Image: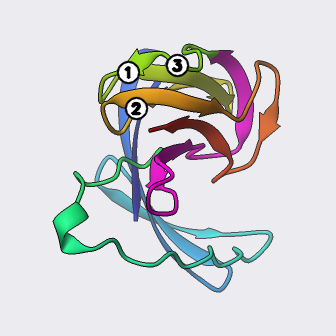
Amino acid sequence: MKEYKFKINGKDYAVVIGEADGKMLTVNVNGADYQVELENAPVAAPVQPAAAPAAAQPAAAPAAAPKAAGAGTTIKSPLPGIIISIDVKEGQAVKRGQKVAVIEAMKMENDILAECDGTVTGIHANKGDSVLEGADIVTIG
């Protein structure tokens, strides 16, 4: 399940996207459920090994997913869109919740936030790039 908060024409929307069942998807908008038919069935995401409990990190934000152990945390695009800004540079220290990029999707700007404190060790997208959901944006080590 993915949760998003949108502001459209000054009105707030809480959107929860459920799991797809074939081409059918449940979407909840401000408490109302909708059944949505997808044009293309979703492709299953690759399964990553679970981290050891001793290395547990805070719950992942929808915009982030951990990379392989020891490689840092890679902030990923939560949805397809166009990168309209990269707000950090390699070597820059960042704090959890700090804006690292902005992506435009469906005519709305979405801030991409750091999931953890650390130093930017890689930038994988540039302003103007079209990215798909799950595309690497920034790595924080």
Who's the residue at 82% across and 29% down the image? 129
C-beta proximity under 8 Å, tags 1 and 2? yes
Q: Specify whether 119 is left or right of 106.
A: left
User: Which amino acid, mark 2?
Assistant: Ala
Whole-angstrom CA distance, mark 1 to mark 2, is 7 Å
Whole-angstrom CA distance, mark 2 to mark 3, is 14 Å
Q: Which residue is mark 3?
A: 91
Who's the residue at 44% across and 62% down the image? 69
User: Which amino acid, mark 1?
Assistant: Val
Crowding near the residue tagged with mark 3, few <14, some 14–19, many ≥20 C-alpha atoms within 10 Å: few
Tell me, for residue 114, which label it has, or none.
2
Q: Which residues are magenta?
A: 64-85
Whole-angstrom CA distance, mark 1 to mark 3, is 9 Å
Who's the residue at 37% across and 76% down the image? 50
Examine the image and state in which quarter residue 28 appears. Answer: bottom left
User: Residue 38, how many percent across, how many down?
Assistant: 71, 69
Query: Which one is earlier in the sequence, the residue at label 1 or at label 2?
Result: 1
User: Residue 108, how many percent across, how many down?
Assistant: 60, 24
Q: Nearer the viewer, mark 1 or mark 3?
A: 3
